[in-house]
Image: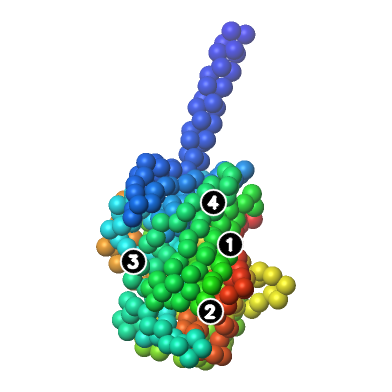
């Protein structure tokens, strides 16, 4: 009997150790908030942590409204960080135009030659992407300190007043962005904005995703579905031509799920121009609210990310300009095509394309946009 008790006790100790090891393995490796404690242009920078009931967590700094980490489980119950980024505010300041995880505005994507007109008044913006304007200019919303308030354990609210003619845009634009990590494992990004002068607005979020975990190799084997039968072809400077072209029978077609890398090296003009995918897709919309934009599955971990939005378009970018020069949170270089972006938006250069959905916001109107990044596991 005594030997039986010893054997049971030993088994219990072995089991408990394994259980503790398993629990430890599943714990996200959060970044120390102190790594982001600083003052920039007289405003305090802070790193906030959101956590839902299932244990998913995200860390967001009010510098650029940047999602620094996003931890979700795989099919084995192991947590991984889904987004590229840095461990310290200094690294973000030293790599100012990677846009890792940032809020983008006043206009996400490109405006041709940095010019547009409202009511016959021409406005000139910075040409910070060769001859074109990109992602809000020299100092977009990715590089400002937002006023932040953590509403609860799962919600962060950010506010910013973009002054009249900041980066050349007309009107004082009052913006609120709310990040919420829901119990359905959704990172919900919701935007509101009002202006005192007619202006243009196209806000987006710019996380780079790798569903294997940041720094964990290629995304070419991710399985991608994009809910779009058309896209907007671009010229040599990546400005849309104005045509809504069919994806059918082209390498641009993701209406049927396929590996991201299946056609990426095809000898096709649009892929040659973009050095891969860097194109706006025209989404099939649900007129009653948000609609499915894309679904990405990573076979080895079983992770699925579904993208829902109220926006008419999404920019699909396949990490064509990552080259290993930037080292990320896990001390691994971010190599060529090791992450993808899905930036919900109105179409690029819409202010100069009257046939595209309008991006004009008038006084007494409210800009409102919603995007959901929903994570689940293959069943």
* Label 4 vs label 3, nearer the camera: 4
Q: CA distance from mark 1 to mark 3?
A: 23 Å
Q: Which quadrant holds the C terminus?
A: bottom right
Q: Secondary structure at mark 2?
A: loop
The mark that comes first in sequence, 4 or 1, is 4
The mark that comes first in sequence, 4 or 2, is 4
Image x and y of residue 117, in percent: 46, 87
According to the picture, the residue beneath numbered tag 1 turns out to be 190
The mark that comes first in sequence, 2 or 3, is 3
Q: Which mark is residue 233?
A: none
* Label 1 vs label 2, nearer the camera: 2
| Quadrant housing residue 15 | top right
Image x and y of residue 196, in percent: 53, 72
Identity of the residue drawn at 36% across and 44% down: 37
The mark that comes first in sequence, 1 or 3, is 3
According to the picture, the residue beneath numbered tag 2 turns out to be 198
| Quadrant housing residue 255 | bottom right
Q: Residue furthest top?
A: 2
Marks 4 & 3, CB-CB < 8 Å contact: no
Marks 1 & 2, CB-CB < 8 Å contact: no
Q: Which mark is residue 156?
A: 4
Q: Which mark is residue 97?
A: 3
Name the side, left or right, on which 285 lies relative to 17. Answer: right
Q: CA distance from mark 4 to mark 1?
A: 11 Å
Q: Residue furthest front?
A: 196
**Mark 2: few/some/many CA within 10 Å (<14, 14-19, 20+):** many
Does residue 206 appear anywhere in the picture?
Answer: no
In this view, the residue in front, 8 or 127, is 127
Identity of the residue drawn at 53% across and 19% down: 10
Name the side, left or right, on which 225 lies relative to 170. Answer: right
Q: CA distance from mark 4 to mark 2?
A: 29 Å
């Amino acid at each position: 009997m005594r030997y039986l008790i010893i054997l049971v006790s030993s088994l219990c100790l072995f089991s408990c150790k394994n259980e503790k090891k398993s629990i430890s393995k599943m714990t996200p490796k959060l970044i120390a908030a102190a790594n982001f404690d600083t003052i920039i242009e007289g405003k305090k920078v802070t790193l906030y942590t959101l956590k839902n009931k299932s244990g998913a967590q995200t860390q967001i700094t009010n510098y650029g409204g940047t999602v620094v980490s996003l931890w979700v489980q795989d099919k084995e119950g192991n947590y991984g960080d889904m987004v590229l980024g840095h461990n310290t505010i200094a690294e973000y300041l030293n790599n100012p135009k990677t846009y890792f995880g940032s809020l983008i505005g006043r206009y996400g994507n490109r405006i041709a030659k940095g010019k547009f007109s409202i009511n016959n008044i021409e406005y000139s913006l910075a040409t910070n992407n060769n001859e074109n304007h990109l992602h809000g200019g020299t100092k977009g919303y990715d590089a400002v300190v937002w006023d932040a308030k953590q509403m609860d354990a799962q919600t962060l609210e950010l506010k910013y007043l973009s002054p009249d003619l900041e980066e050349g845009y007309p009107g004082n634009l009052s913006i609120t962005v709310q990040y919420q990590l829901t119990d359905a494992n959704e990172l919900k990004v919701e935007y509101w904005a009002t202006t005192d002068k007619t202006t243009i607005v196209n806000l987006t979020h710019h996380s780079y995703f790798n569903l294997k975990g940041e720094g964990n190799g290629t995304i070419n084997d991710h399985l991608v579905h994009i809910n779009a039968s058309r896209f907007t072809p671009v010229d040599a400077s990546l400005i849309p031509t104005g045509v809504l072209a069919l994806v059918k029978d082209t390498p641009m077609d993701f209406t049927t799920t396929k590996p991201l890398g299946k056609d990426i090296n095809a000898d096709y003009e649009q892929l040659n121009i973009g050095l891969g995918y860097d194109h706006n897709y025209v989404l099939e919309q649900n007129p009653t609210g948000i609609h499915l934009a894309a679904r990405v599955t990573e076979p080895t971990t079983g992770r699925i990310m579904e993208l829902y939005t109220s926006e008419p378009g999404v920019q699909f970018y396949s990490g064509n300009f990552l080259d290993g020069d930037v080292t990320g949170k896990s001390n691994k270089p971010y190599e060529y095509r090791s992450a993808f972006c899905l930036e919900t938006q109105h179409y690029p250069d819409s202010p100069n394309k009257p046939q595209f959905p309008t991006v004009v916001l008038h006084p007494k109107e409210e800009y409102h946009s919603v995007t959901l990044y929903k994570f689940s596991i293959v069943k």
